Amino acid sequence: IQLTQSPSSLSASVGDRVTITCRASQGISSYLAWYQQKPGKAPKLLIYAASTLQSGVPSRFSGSGSGTDFTLTISSLQPEDFATYYCQQLNSYSFGGGTKVEIK
Amino acid sequence: QVQLQESGPGLVKPSQTLSLTCTVSGGSISSGDYYWSWIRQPPGKGLEWIGYIYYSGSTYYNPSLKSRVTISVDTSKNQFSLKLSSVTAADTAVYYCASYREMVAATLRLGFDPWGQGTLVTVSS
């Protein structure tokens, strides 16, 4: 199963609403997770089951979708949110190519 | 709180076997629902899932790596290990171990968490 993330990178300002999409090459129900990775650090789980927020993750992060199309939304971008975001499907565990969120 | 820590050589010669160990602390590797996983990330690139093992010894590997990968578990030491044979420069990466949890007959899949800090393995002569 291939996962295609878009965009591959984006520039945004603090306070902006940011949306990242992830499209699966075949249906995966809601078996999708989102991760945040900062330079030199391991990825951090943000969302599983497409829309369930991992414990301790701020509520400005949200996920939606099922089947083949999914989105990760950051409602109001904070300075600590500048990072690379990956989706992962939990049928055969492949990752999307990543979306780098940079400061405008 | 479960923590994971990778260990092993940082430099491996081409054609040799890469060997890494992940030590689990703060919890038992024999806990049900958990699958103990390896993921890698070449420098400046994305993430690639390698495979996982259940405490019973059952394994599941990425088909693209399956012919070269062996994951094993030592429940007495609360550790699991990765062996990748016939390595080339393309296997140079940061290697992470992580736990993956499924519940309710795999209908609830909770993602990979936590992760170890990662260890860089360079393949070079």
Image (cartoon, coloured by chain):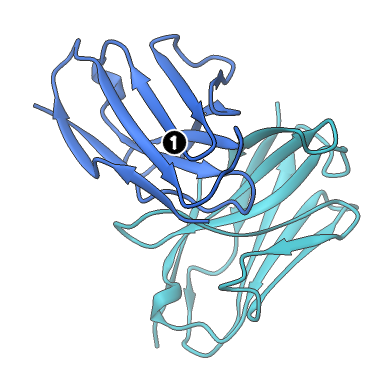
Instruction: Give the answer, above or below, for where B118 lies relative to A7.
Output: below
Q: Secondary structure at mark 1?
A: strand
Instruction: Give the answer, above or below, for where B47 lies relative to B101.
Output: below
| Kind of residue at badge 1 | Asp
Q: Which residue is mark 1?
A: A69
B77 vs A80, left or right, is right
The chain carrying label 1 is A
Q: Residue A44: x and y, percent?
A: 49, 33
Q: Residue at x 24, y 45 (%)?
A: A8
Q: Nearer the viewer, residue B16 or A101?
A: A101
Regarding residue B11, the answer to whether it shows in the image is yes
A100 vs B20, left or right, is left
Quarter occupied by the C terminus of chain A: top left
Q: Residue B69: x and y, percent?
A: 66, 74
Q: Residue at x 58, y 73 (%)?
A: B65
A79 vs B99, left or right, is left
Q: Nearer the viewer, residue A51 or A13?
A: A51
Colour chosen for chain A: blue
Which chain is tinted cyan? B
**Mark 1 closeness class: few <14, some 14–19, many ≥20 residues within 10 Å:** many
B25 vs B45, left or right, is right
Q: Residue B82: x and y, percent?
A: 67, 66
Q: Nearer the viewer, residue A25 or B102?
A: A25
